[in-house]
Structure formats: structure tokens, C-alpha cells
Image (cartoon, coloured by chain):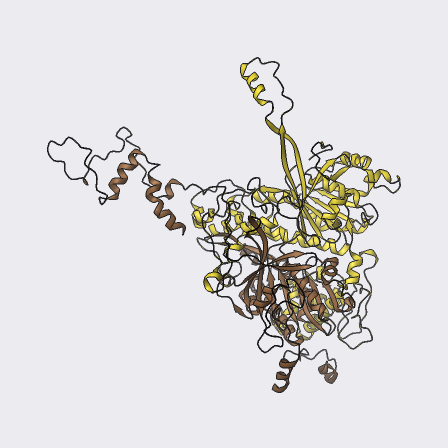
Chain colours: A yellow, B brown
Amino acid sequence: MTDLVRVLPHFPVGLYANLILVLERHGLTTSDLLTLDPADIGKRTHLPLLDVKRFCSAVLAALHADLGISPPRPGPRSHRSGADPVPRSGSGAGAGAERVQTNNQSGPFTNALRNTPASLASQWQTISTLDESLDRALGGGIPAGYITEITGESGAGKTQFLLTLLLAVQLPPPHGLGRPALYISTEAPLSTRRLAQMLNANPLFRSMDRASRPSLDQIISTATPDLESQDHILTFQVPVEVERRNIGLVILDSVAANYRAEFERSASGGQAANMGARRADLVRLGMHLRELAQKYNLAVVVSNQVADRFGGGGIIGRSFKTPASSASSRPHPSVSNLATGRGSLGNRATQNSPLATRSKPLPPVALTAEEEEERFLASLMRPPPPPPFPGDEDSIRPQPPALLLDHQQQWFTGWGDDRYADYGLKTPSLGVVWSTQISARIALLKRPSYGPKKYVTSGKGNDDDDDEYADRSARGMPTLRNWRRWMKVVFSSHAPASGPGTEDAVEFEMYMGGIRAITGKDDEKETKGGET
Amino acid sequence: MDYHARHGYDESSFDLPSTHRLPTISAAEALEELDGSDKLQPIPTRLAALDDVLGALPGCAGGTVDADLNDLGNPGAGGGGGGIQKGEVTEIWGPPGVGKTSFGLQLAASCLQDYGGVVWVDGFHRLPVERLQSTVGPAQDGLDERFIHYTCPSLAHFIALLCRPTAGCIPSGTSLIVVDALSALLSHAFPKSLDTREDADSKGGKKGPPKSATRLQVLQYIVGGLQKLAATRNVAIVILTQCATKMQADRGSTLIPAINASIWEQGISTRLVLFHDWVEDGENYGPRHLRFVGVQKLHGKASDASMGDVCAFEIRPSGLVSVEYDRTQTCAALFSTPAPKRKLVDTDFEIPDSDDDEDYGWQIDDEDLPPNPSQWQGSEDLLLAPQQSDDEAQDDNEVEDPVAEEPEVHKGGESGDEL
């Protein structure tokens, strides 16, 4: 059983060794064991029926025990009304045998699968960002047990944000978790200099005495330059480290970097298969991170890059009435749902049918991942390959225009929900697949602020007239003075989302001691500190 | 339980101990049940317009009450007695962050208020408990007994919990089971891969049925198990599903529910979709962002159009509140980017022959014009009648000003296409 070990780590495999060997050869998963009739399994595998039945019921009983449910026998134990969470326990030998509940897993790592609100509340912990307004916007901080994504352009302050968290997690609750942190970087190594700067300059750290201050010793870092090493490290080495040191925060800086590098390099021919493999990879990664987060009650924070979103021209001039309005007599909303120049492929599909892409080479435009994949899938239509899941395609009727990806993604990507802004739109990498793996997305927005040019350098070496003219006209011309940054909660399971654009987003700045929110209008503040 | 009391626990017996038959009751009992009890009372969603649409099954107590639209978000007062039906499986899907979990919380709070029990099954991320507490509000007594939360780390756990439940899984008195993100478990267990050649397993030995068939079979089992559970225990099962994307031929990428299989859709009796959209707001002069609930399938009957009635709501810390908006307004989008220019090959324009530039494309043989009378020296009075062939006019026009004139000629065609 390929996944029995993963699903039920404490199942006594030794008792059923011969069965499991045969079942594995036939590629049966644990779900198959539960959903198929024992007679069917016996027919396929030619195993004795009684053994199969016993094995299946043993697996089922083990799963129930895992979930914290009392066995079906009328026994003295009843764990139903639980103010105390039932600890995750190992399983007995079978339903027929005497039930032995042993507590195999002990220590701080057990997390019950069955809970009541009281026990859930006791497990809720957050890591503060060391700033009140930011914490308030985040609903207390970054929560433990969830995957949070921080996305933004380069230079927006993602890495600074993460460095702050690395130090904050070491503080005792309520600011942090009092546990060490793990930093996995895919691009640049951990900037220890900046961390030391922050330690020295942050007022909160300064107010603590040396012994209880966070230290760099509690931060473990590693670099994963490519996808293979990233997979290996995350799957095998990170759980070991987490368990050994009771790590409270795992940061994966730039989850997108390795995926983009790996999957974009291949030739266009195999790209459809690549996209499918990438999607499966992302799902697996999301599942693995979430297992880590929940099993050890730690916070997983990933940072993501963005790609430009091009306004290729929307489906201008059409107003889509929702189909119900034509069908029924009641006045229905006629909302015109347009991919108003936001979607990069909103109109492209109408211009060139997907089949036409075969004849023309694709322009090098940053397509979103799904569109890339679908486009290549469509281009493989002749000769048509068997669809991955036959019989499914018919069941989907055409969806209403409101559900176009380009239209809906304005709200869950973090860019585009301000109706009047149509420039500088970005889309976080890795598409909808990754967006469904995270539980919260925080976008760091960056906007330039212009001001009159105060100083004009006069070229000493040149005595051209042009130069003088340029000087004269350059004085007072707007020039880039500063970058303003906002932190915006795009969506989150535990905090209210920020309003459109930068309305409710918290403006922050970076300074020597980390990041802090700007309260009130302060245009004169200069940003100090390192920027990545 | 009767079965085991009678037959004991015999491991080697192949009889099915689970009641896969619904318990039989006499018709008189059934009628009595329908009339008087509130067992079949639907769980109100507290969004007045949505409750109206969802309606109540005929014959149910508290069927048609005029909805008081002024009581927006007022629990218990709004709604025409409609809501999520018990004994049925409902699916709610939408893009990330649109409010599926909030919707589930609202239903749970509404159910807890009527002293029903709630079981919340998390397939992916855990429910943040403070949101539950803020939605339920002050009526928190006995919350721990009536709200049970399960986390399912894998699909096998989920199947064991809900499709092969024991007596202890779902405590009696439960009225609502919410499953959050079943699609995540499914997509992990059955990764969709475009490469169907992976079935040729290199492990050797016999290959089972392909992954796709296994997936369909498991889906069928799950949906059957959920239906059975809903019917026998008289609970409402609500499944919150994530979205996936699919390319539609003429429109580009669109969102679809992550679990798309006809077997699954047959088992779901009601399907709601949550999405965002703009709405023209008269008072603020500008489009306003609202979230919408669309009804795609109701009580087993798919709506004729791809989306039925639509209601708007907003998310507040205390839950969802219904929002009234002007349904007759169309949201005029703002076009700041012009329509993309068509490529020249895509148009119907005739590209002038650029070979002989000096001649400006004058056609040497002019068969269309009538032969000039003898000693003709040309005259401006000769106006070409409009009934004459358009080609001719086009030829002349195109020669002089190929860009400016053409759009006028083709404008009728364009706007015709647009509509």
C-alpha cells in the first residue's frame, strides 16, 4: 500500500505483510480499500476473501481511532462529549480483537483530529509583526497552523517582512511562539547583517534584556537552488528538523522561483504535460506544507512573485445580460461583465481561436499559468488526445460571463479591485492552483510618489547648450522621490479583507528596526534600512 | 445496532451490518411527520433574498411567509421559511476568498441558534474558531457539545468518517454537516495529469483500472454515501468546494467547480456559486463591489440558464448580510484601453497592390464604367451613381485615402458584429 504508511503511520503493517504486498502491486490505495467491496478486491488480487475483509475493517477501525471516535462496540469508553481533545492514538489489531489504544505519539506534537471550539481556541496562536496596526489588520498576526502567502513586486518589502517574522517568532506568546524558525531560500541567502541590524534597532528588542532577546542562533537557514533539491529538502529534511528542534515557523522564500525556472525552460512541445505535472506538484507541495503546519502547529509563510498583467483589450462594448434576465420575467441584474482590459487573454481567445495558435508562434507575453496550459492543451487538439477524465467534459455547461477568470481574479489576486486603476496590474505567479492551496494572501503594494526635483546636477564636463537647457527645464519637473508601500490583506480565513485598492491597506515603511506602519500623513519620512 | 444485538459480532460473516435501506415507516406516520414536526425545517441562510429563492419544500411547516425585506440580516425574522434543506446535499463553490467559509459559518450559527447540532469537517485549513464565536454571538452556552470539529488529513479519513460512519461519528441531534474543501483532498488523491501515459506503471505486474476510472468510482461512492447519510440522519450536508479553471472556446479561461464529474453533479441536489462583481451604485457614482450568490441547481433541477437567481451580500464580522442593489442598472465598465487593433489580414480590406506604386493602383482595364463617348474630355459633372457597384466606389476611395474612408464604409458591419 503505497499510501497506507502516509495515511496511517502507526498501523501495524507487520500483521498483514503478505496482503499489503499484493495490494501494492495492484496499485490499490487506501481509499480504494474503503470504497470497493471486499469481493471486488478479492477478484482483482486473488487474495483470500476473509483476509481482505479483515484487513479492510482493520484499516477502517484505525482511521476511526485516528479521528478520535469511539469504536462501534458497546464499550465502556465513550469519547463523544469532548471538552478534552482525544489524543491521536494508534490502532489495535482489528475490529474483532481486543481494542488496545496506545498513545504512540506523545509530546507537544500531537494535534487531535476531533475538536470542540474550546480546544480549537486553545490551539490558536499568532506571530506578531511587531507593529500594532499591521497586527490589527492581520487579525492578530500570522497564525500558526496555516499557510500564509506574501506576494508583491520586487522591492516591495517581502523579505523584510519575513525577516521580522523570523525574529518575532522567538518571542514568548503573545508576540510569538517562543520557538525557533527555519528559513528556506530559493534565491538569495539569508541576510544576517540585516537581522543583526533589526535586533539592535528595534525598540521592542531593545527594551528586553539580553537573555530573553531573540538571537540569530535560533534561526536555521538553507538554500534550495533548484526544484529537485527543494522537493527533497521539504519532503525529507524539513520534517526531521522541525521535530528535532520544535520549530515554530517555516519560511519558504519565493515558492515560485524554482517552478518558473524549471517549467518554463522546456520546449513548447512538452509544455502541456509540464503544466499538468506542475499543477500536480503544486497540489502536493500545498498538501505537504499544510500537513506540516497542522501536525506540528507551526506557521508556514511563503513568498510569491508577481507577473505583469497586460491589458490586451477586453471584450469592449458588450454588455452581458445574465442569462436569467432573458429567461424569466422578473427584472434581473444585467451586469455587464467585461474583462475590461485587465485580462491578458480575455480577448485573445476571441481573436484567435485556440486552434489558430498552432499556425502562429506565440508572442512572448506573460500568460497566466492556466491559460498557458489550456492553450497548449487546445493546441494539441489535432489529433485529439483522450481527455484526461473522459465523460466529464459534457457535464459542464458554459458558465456565465461573470465567472471568467480574468474577471474574478481581480479580487483574489490583490490587484485590480480598484475600479479606476488600470496600470501596473500584477498577478501572483503559479495561478489559481496555488491560490487554492493557501489560506491567506497578503499583498505588498508599491507605488511611486513623485515630487518636484529639488536638485539638478549640472554637467561639469559638458558645456553644451543642450545641457543648460535641460537644467533649466528640469528644475521643478516631477521626479521619483520615494516609494510608498501598503500591506493589503487580499483574502484570509481569519481576518477581514481589505477594501478596494489601497483603501483599507495599511501603509508601512521600512526602517532600521524592521517595518512599521505609518500613522498619519508623513511624507517627509525617509526610508532607511536594506531593501531587496 | 439492532443487527449486532441480534447476530453478535461475527467477523467472518459477509452480511452488511449497515442499514443501506431506509427505515420503513407507515404512510400515516410519514404524513404526521411532514405536517407537524419541524424536523424538515430548512436551515435559513439569513440572506432574505436567497431564502426566498431556495424556498421551502411543499408541505413543510412555515412554508410561505412574506419576507420582510427591511429586516436585513435579522436572524429568524427574514426569509420565507426557506433555506438549506435537510436530507439533501448542497454544494457551494467559488473562487478563493469570496466567502465560502463565511457562508458555512453563517449556516452553522443559524443552526446552532435553533439548538441543532453542527459537525464541521475540514479538509484543508482549519476553521478559525474566533470567527465561529463572533458569528454565533452571545448564545454560546452548550457550544462545545453541539459543535464538533473534525480535521481530515487525507481522503481515506474523510471516507471513513462520513461514508462509513459509526454511531459515534455524527452525534444524534446533528442538523448540519459542513465539509470545507473536499476538493483539496480529492485533487491531492487524484492529481489531474494531462499525461495519460502514466498508466503504464513501471512497477510491472498487473495494472488496475486507469486513474480516471478510479476517481469516478470513488466520487460515486462518496456522493452516494453522503446522500445516504443525509437521508437517514436527516441532516443537511453542505460541501464547500474550491474552483478550477477551464478554457472555453470563445471566451477564454473561466472558473468551474473543482469537482467536475457528471456523477457528482447528479448527487448534488442544490448548487450555489459565490462570485464577485461590480454593480453600478447610484449614490456613490461609481461601480461598487459586491459579492453575489447564484443558484445553479435547486432541489435537483438545474436552472435553465447557466445561472439562476442572483442575490448580493457582504461579509461583516458578525456574518453575512444581504444587500439590496439596483438590479436594473447595468454596470458600464470603463474603457480606458481601446479595443485592440485588428490585424490587417483579419479584416476585409483590400490591400492595395503595392507593386506598381507609380500608377497608384489605377486599374488598367476598366470594364465597369460605360465606354466614354467619343471626344470625351472628362467632366466633373459625371457623378457616379450610388447604385453603381460598391467595388468601384471602393476602388476610388481606397486609392485616395485608404485609411480614413474605410471605417465609415464598414461601420455598419462592425456594430452588427458587436451586437
- Answer yes or no: is residue A38 visible: no
Percent coordinates x, y for residue A28 in the rendering: 63, 64
Quick one: which residue is furthest to the left in this view? B374
Q: Tell whether A398 sits left or right of B121.
A: left
Q: Is residue A300 above or below residue A525?
A: below
- Answer yes or no: is residue A8 visible: yes
Percent coordinates x, y for residue A429 in the rendering: 60, 45
Towards the viewer: A38 or A313: A313
Tell me what residue is drawn at x 79 percent, y 46 percent: A169
Towards the viewer: B306 or B380: B380
Q: Tell whether A369 sits left or right of B75.
A: left
Towards the viewer: A428 or B273: B273
Q: Is residue A290 above or below residue A117?
A: above
Percent coordinates x, y for residue A517 in the rendering: 73, 40
- Number of marks drawn: 0
Kindly indicate the quadrant of the structure image that contains residue B160: bottom right
Percent coordinates x, y for residue A356 in the rendering: 43, 47
**The N terminus of chain B is located in which quarter?**
bottom right
Q: Is residue A419 above or below residue B225?
A: above
